[in-house]
Image (spheres, rainbow, N blue to C red):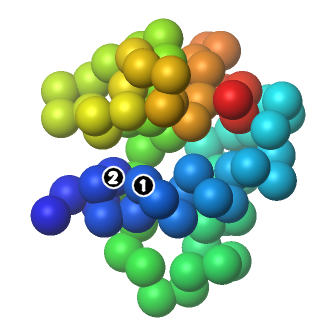
Amino acid sequence: MEAFVRYHAQLKQLMTNYKGQTLTTSQIKSIFRNHYPNADIRYLQPSDHCINKTNNGACECACTNNAIFEYIKRGVYKVL
């Protein structure tokens, strides 16, 4: 199971505390790591969970109303 699928629910829950804020990839991963220190997040990419950006193998939430982030620019995302 891919990391973005494995951790989607946890990421979505954590990001509710940051709704409307703009965060970097590093900040997002740090927040996740602080709450789930044993999680393997090597492949956890905010761009896989964007309403306005897709990647090969993106989460099924991408480009839907269930997306977690809006892509602002490389490495920068707004929490939806």
User: In the rendered image of this protein, does residue 38 appear above or below residue 75?
Assistant: below
Q: In front here: 42 or 53?
A: 53
Q: Nearer the viewer, residue 3 or 63?
A: 63
Q: Which circle, 1 or 2, is nearer the viewer?
A: 1
Gap in angstroms between the C-alphas marked 1 and 2: 6 Å
For the C terminus, the quadrant is top right
- Which residue is label 1 attached to? 8
Element marked by disc 1: helix
Quick check: 44 above or below 46?
A: below
What residue do we see at 28% from left, 34% from top? 60
Q: Which mark is residue 49?
A: none
What residue is shown at x 84% (from left), y 34% (from top)?
A: 21
Q: Indicate the position of residue 41 as horizontal and vertical percent values.
A: 41, 66
Near mark 2 (Cα within 10 A), the count class, few <14, some 14-19 or many ≥20, is many
Determine whether, in the image, residue 31 is placed left or right of residue 1.
right
User: Quick one: label 1, few (<14), some, or many (20+) residues within 10 Å?
Assistant: many
Residue in view at x 48 percent, y 32 percent: 66
Report x, y in % for residue 54.
Answer: 33, 18
Task: Please name the amino acid that badge 1 sits on.
Answer: His
Task: Evaluate whether residue 78 shows in this view.
Answer: yes
Q: Quadrant of the N terminus?
A: bottom left
Image coordinates for residue 13, horizontal then vertical, percent: 63, 58
Q: Secondary structure at mark 2?
A: helix
| Residue under pointer 2 | 4
Residue found 20% across the figure and 58% down from its top: 2
Marks 1 and 2 in Cβ contact (< 8 Å): yes
Q: Is residue 59 left or right of residue 75?
A: left
Image coordinates for residue 9, horizontal then vertical, percent? 47, 59
On the picture, is 1 further left or further right than 58? left
Residue type at tag 2: Phe
